[in-house]
Amino acid sequence: MIRSKFLVSLSATAALFCALSTTVDANTTAKNVPVQFLGINDLNGYIDSTYTNSAGKTIGGMASLAYNLSKEKQAFAKTNNLKSANTNSISVHTGDILGGGPAISSLLQDHPTISILNAMNFQLGVIGNHELNDGLDEFLRVIQGKKATYDTPNYDLVSRYKIEKSNTTILAANVVNKKSKKTISGFKPYEIKTINGVKVGFIGVVDPYVQQLIMPTHTKNLSFTDPAKAIAKYDKVLRKKGIKAIVVLAHAGAENTGTSNQAIETQAAKPNKAQVGGSVTQIIDKLDKIAPNHSVDIVFGGHSHSFANGIYGKKNIRVVESLDYGKSYNVATGKISTTTNDFVKTPAATVKYNYTRSNTVINKNSVAKNVNRIVQNAAQLTATVTRAQIATLDAERLSSVRIAKIEGSAVGNLVADSQLALMKNLERHVDFAFTNSGGVRDDLVATVKDGRNIITWEAAQKVQPFSNFLYTGQLTGAQITQVLNEQFSGGRGLEVAGLHYTYNDKEIVDVFVGDKSSSEKIVANKSYTVVLNNYLTGGGDNFPTFTKLKNSEIIGIDTDTFIDYLKAMKNVPTAYTPRSVQVEK
């Protein structure tokens, strides 16, 4: 954190009579060393996906990101008269880089994403909730580059991939072993990097809220402690080591709140103070209170998938976050004094679109060309599965966007219907199906071919990528009503089948059995058979009543169930009827 002008001046004066003890680039002044941080967040294995921004420009793709980040480094080196484009730049991420993504990476347990980060020299990152989708042991296997075993998901495909160890140091200062209270094995609370003679401290933290988004069995031995207290603890450790330039990598959401700074296209060159909000700012508020002498200069956010760029807190901390899925990246720059070991002023930052580059351009850059090779290899290994045609769609796209928090989506209806159909295909009695809206990960997007809207295996898998177990069991009518009401008290939204309901601003009004033509109300003390995924049975997404499921048993896997349902339908209609309706009373 920046020192007062008086102290900086005093230190600088004293330094005139002392020889420098650090070695810096010949083109870097003795007083100030320029540094650059390049960041991404929430990639989720979307290594080859492209999108269109509001200006109609194509964005996305990791080969393009490799090219764009290389150019950022080169431009920074040229501007600051550096000998090398790599000495003063560090690439970082803030979690959810793996997990919950498309088949090109997920079918290979995200090993291609690890290979890509290595090729691009991502040095530091923080753990996110999706890194634990398959549990801590599997995540450690992946980043440690260990061979797949027969217990590894998608073993047949993974065993054919050339696995490599991750070169990215993962930080997790506030994720500790529940018994020992120490940082979980395999990770570090902080790291120190020397950049052209000056030292920078990095602390990694996770918003404790994400524990609700991870299967309980995967977190039973973990504790997610207060991130502000963790930052304060290791900030003090770093300052005792003489390190005052401190960067926090936070898997915690940031968002813009300023009216003139709402999008990448309109971000201000010098954002006004307090133009950012979200979980990150709550962490900073507490940090300012409990450790007023802290030296944090930058916080890179993640998890919320949203653009943010501003200055916040009593110490003018730069807060920045990019868009998800490789759509954008952030560039933060500053200068560190060799006399104070701190930034001379609040670092600058810009969030930029990851504009998609042509193969011709990519092939002229060695790093981008190598990343493109990794992507193409992954695509080739998974092609026989991902490109299979399973059905057609009445339109080019079916939306996963909910109109309101208490209402489902068109794709959500389809997912819930598939789980209801599974039980009927097994000739098992079933009343209702539930799935969490957060688990419906994408729109159902068709590929237009010969005038037909083709649904591929990959397109369906993008909607339901987690391969969660499906359970059946019994809940009472009262419990079902309570589950629906939990959407008002922190629950992140539900997709339903076999029932419909009405609600007002505060609570559920009535729950009915069957489709919207039915007027049969649910009976509070009656037992109903339901189907739901293992994420919900553990109370995930703030639905604790689901943990009361009785007589539960596994009946299938949600990804396979959804794909098989589409296959059986052959053609998927796009008509959407909401299964919840808001009323006045």
Image (cartoon, grey):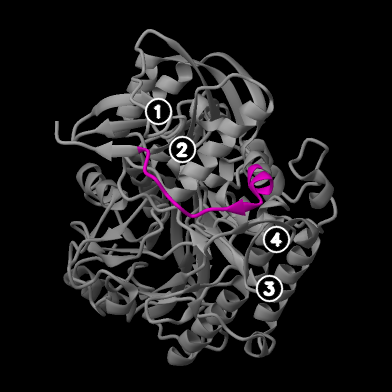
- Tell me the element at label 3: helix
Residue 371: image tag: 3
Badge 2 is on which residue?
A: 436
- Residue 47 covered by magenta stretch: no
Q: Mark 1 or 2 closer to N-term?
A: 2
Q: Is residue 254 above or below residue 480?
A: below
Residue 415: image tag: none
Badge 1 is on which residue?
A: 543
Which percent across, then down, holds residue 199? 46, 65
Which percent across, then down, holds residue 166? 67, 56
Q: Residues within 10 Å of mark 2 (few under 14, many from 20)?
A: many
Q: Mark 2 or 3 closer to N-term?
A: 3
Q: Are marks 1 and 4 in contact (CB under 8 Å)?
A: no
Q: Residue at x 42, y 78 (%)?
A: 33
Residue 112: image tag: 4
Q: Are marks 2 and 4 in contact (CB under 8 Å)?
A: no
- Tell me the element at label 2: strand
Front: mark 2 or 3: 2
Numbered range of the magenta stretch: 565-579
CA–CA distance in space, label 2 to label 4: 28 Å
CA–CA distance in space, label 2 to label 3: 34 Å
